[in-house]
Image (spheres, rainbow, N blue to C red):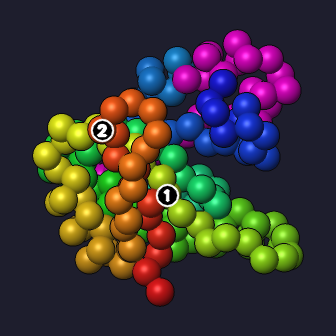
Amino acid sequence: APPAAAAGAEAVVLTDADELALELAGAAAALNGAAVSERISCRRLDWAEAPDASLGAFDLLLGADLLYDRQAATLLARVIADLLAAPTAAESTGSSGERAPARCLLADPPQRPFRAHFEETARSAGLEVEEMALPGPEGMIMLNIMLAN
């Protein structure tokens, strides 16, 4: 199961532009039993297109090893900005109480040459990007991304 679903997230949306990848992700989620898989949906998301509002509202976006070329880094920065600018899941459901702002956490391998380009593009799209060490695989970088104030 995706870690977010296994950790108890109310809903998890797995995205990819490739239909086969989505089918495989859905099949893998189903192997984890109904208690987990009923909270998981698989949706097509092409970074070259504006995200569809029907995709939902999110409190947290998670991704790993996504900055593999310059175009992907450019498109991903725009999609993250669009998704973080939408109301959060808590705001959409009318949940009250103090909540942390929506954010995106990206894990990126150290050898990727497009991280700086992604950060520059993200900042110009109104995002704040903070690099952090990621416990685990040696050298991995965690990018903590939020809307700039």
Query: Would you say 30 lies left or right of 38 here?
Result: left
- Residue 39 visible to an observer of this rendering: yes
For disc 2, the marked residue is: 139
- Residues drawn in magenta: 25-48
- Viewer-closest of 86 and 118: 118
Place residue 86 in its image quadrant. bottom right
**Rendered location of residue 16, percent (x, y):** 44, 36
- Viewer-closest of 59 and 24: 59
Label 1 Cα neighbours within 10 Å, binned few <14 / some 14-19 / many ≥20: many
Q: Is residue 117 above or below residue 113?
A: below
Q: Give the CA distance from mark 1 to mark 2.
A: 20 Å
Tell me which residue sits at (61%, 17%) in the image. Answer: 28
- Residue 82 visible to an observer of this rendering: no
**Rendered location of residue 95, percent (x, y):** 84, 70
Label 1 or label 2, whichever comes before in sequence order:
1
Q: Amino acid at mark 1?
A: Cys
Q: Is residue 122 above or below residue 1?
A: below
Q: From the image, which quarter does the N terminus lie in? A: top right
Q: Which mark is residue 104?
A: 1
Tell me which residue sits at (60%, 56%) in the image. Answer: 60
